[in-house]
Amino acid sequence: MNPPDGAPRPPTYPSQLESMVLPKQRASPASSLASLPYRTSNPSLHKLFESTASLSGSRASSGTATPTASVVPGSVFSPGSRQNGTGTPVALPPGVSDEHRILIQRAFVPHVAVLADAETEQFIRGKGLEGGLLQLLRPFGESVPGKVTIRDSVGAGRSYDDFGVRFVGANDGLGLPLSAGRNSGLRVSTETSRDGGRVSSSSIRPRRVGGDVAQIEELVDRHLQYSEFNAHDPMPDYFDQREASAPSDSSSSPFYTLFLKRLLSGLPLVPHETFAHPVASVIAVSSQSPDPIEELRSLYSRQTTGDLRLPPWVENQYLRYYVLVDDEETGDIAKSKQTFDAMKRHFGLHCHLLRLKRQQCIPSDDDSVRLPTCEWMSASEELAEIQKRETTDDITDPTPYLPDSDVTAIKTFIRELVAQSIIPNMERHTAQWNEQVLSRRRGMAGRFMSISKRWTPFGGGRSSSSSASSNSNYDSNQGFYRNDAPEALMRKLADYSFMLRDYKLALSTYDVLRSDFNNDKAWRHYAGAVEMAALSALMPTDRLPSKTRVDSIDTWIEAASYNYTNRQQMNTPYYALRSLACSVELLRLRGGSAADDGARWSSRILELGLVGPVGSALFTERASACYVVRSGIGSMRLGSRRRKAALWSVRAAESWYRLDKALQAEKCLDTALRLYGSQADAGEVVKGLPFPEMQAFIDELRQQILGLRLANRGFDDEQNENDVEDSLVVEEATETLDTNPRIHRKSLIGAAPPLMDVGPLSPTLERGEEIKKDDQFE
């Protein structure tokens, strides 16, 4: 509507587009974001990348893509560790976090199968959980509320506040993980396809079973790509400026932590180890069922003799825990209690009455609580969830909400299940197998039986091999031991001890098993035994003699990697990667010569080709981190490995550059320059690197990384120099207002840090000249 005559008219402002001078852009990965499924405005999608994007997007004064602060914040998929990565046990080197040791400790936990009737599943789905009872219980079981007390083999009790269990489906975990070629990189499953060297997530089918290294690489690559395209310089309020924390050389990248966590998530159900074998099963029925007792018996029969029976190498006589699910709003509590009493008379004391509300809760409710997201989900599940949120039109968080009373009831149920049923049952079986099976094999009679199995009849000769195969409990045709064989019981004893954190008993049991498996030529079982023997020896934080580590642990790690990768008809590189990756982290924590061994095993992963391009860059970083831990002795730092650490960091920067990950490459290059600069004496100003060739290589790599970062932002190499100079003038005028201008870089070009700590890259290379060399960026 036009204003009346004589009325004042509003002032006319120039169009925003007319007042802005945008730089010329060309086709680049960043400029084609509109065609990619990444939606930066989708808050639901951002939560999936929060564990890595929150760190890699905030660049500290050194210009690093992922700050080296040791505190890693949590997210919906990768919550922070219980100690926030800052806990340093007394036996470990000062300043070295045991975050990854705790991660390994929490990865090997008891598995509990979940089975419910149709009425219970329908009741839970009505609350907004499409996964039924398993989706409801799974996130709460990963951290049992309160402290859990566990008694070891000598009766000493220790309390833990980070103990958890894994709730799995009744038929989950079957099948070996996908294998990869030894020297040909990663092979992709027939269920997935490659598009330009990248696994297409459109063909990913969510499976709760892990072990697919290709999908782990794809997941970490998605996090890296999101970080590259959505990273920005921090711009806090002027009055809220904070000094950047000093970088720590020993901290780890959140992308590597994500890689290691997904590597240990969703352990497959296999014959040569029992970690994924269920120690208990939750059988749930609804109080609305016509005959709950008979329904419980029917579900039990399905697991023992029906369609849900596990393979013959899995013990089916494990603990059953019976749950009666009652509707708190419309159910008859008197009738439910009568049914619950009948359950205890028929099935014993391992029963529970779980009362839940039927109504579906929404975020606006007063007592609504967001359902926690599973931390230990497989890479396939997380990729499927990312794809789902990328393609949906709804930007709201699809995570369901529960009433606070339901959350309290579920936590009470899980604590009662774990503290009063699962742990006492595992302790009882451990004591029984230790007394009846393992103790007999340790004595002279057990040793004599082992020798007689191998060499009967005495005098050996041609008949020794045939007699050994006839006396062995190992079925070489099918590749497993019967679940009641002594070797299978001892393997369960060792795995139970490891899950209950009794590493001394676990080590002694694995040590007995490895000789038996070697005699039976059960190579996959032998590789699993020596792998876990090495981890059992490294998990405690007590000091370990160097001779024991060299003579025993290094030999076990070598035997595990060799048997997993080189034995005929047994190419399982997933387990070789798992054993080597865990050994790298546990050796690195001990410092000294053990850290050198960790770097050596990290390089072995690269030599064997167990990982793809992303994994190669990550483990190259870990080799550098292992060498950093060994800081040296005295003021001269005798025995330090700073130069080796810097070299591996430069190699990691070059690997990230080849993968078009400019921010990660810049972070590694800054770390290398800081390590090279730390070789100088106190008070000495470093003018450059020791050799001109090194300086020229670093200068060239720095310019290439800077050019890649500008290309990822969409800047053209033929951009007008006047526009660049104008942007620099604006930047310099803004920086004069900042107390610490290096923290508040506003332009992408200014984000390349001047190396004030270790000297300039070149004495004659000024910042203005660096910008004008656009023809060298590409």
Image: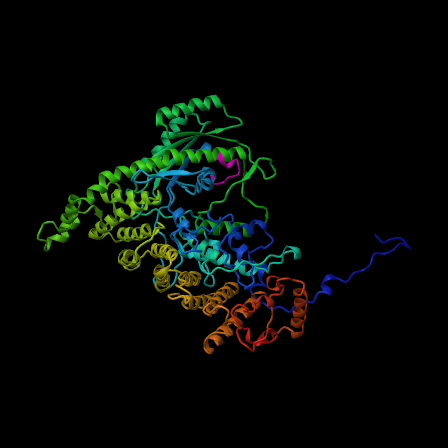
- Span of residues in magenta: 121-131
Residue 567 is situated, as x and y percent measured from the top left of the image, at: 27, 58
- Check the image and name the residue furthest to the right: 6
Residue 192 visible in image? no
661 is higher (above) or lower (below) than 484? below
**Where in the figure is residue 671, as x and y percent of width and height?**
48, 65
Where 537 sits versus 301, above or below? Answer: below
Instruction: Verify whether residue 458 appears in magenta.
Output: no
Is any part of residue 245 visible from this angle?
yes
The quarter of the image holding the C terminus is: bottom right
376 horizontally vs 486: left or right:
right
Task: Give the total of numbered labels.
Answer: 0
Taking depth in this image into account, of 757 and 777 the one nearest to the observer is 757
Percent x, y for residue 545? 30, 56
| Image point (44%, 47%), residue name | 376
Colouring method of the image: rainbow
Q: Position of residue 269 (x, y in %)?
A: 34, 46
Foreground residue among 428 and 47: 428
Please name whichever residue, 424 or 682, is drawn nearer the observer in this view of the structure: 682
Say whether residue 516 is left or right of residue 685.
left
Q: Residue at x 22, y 38 (%)?
A: 436
* Left or right of 600, for residue 519: left
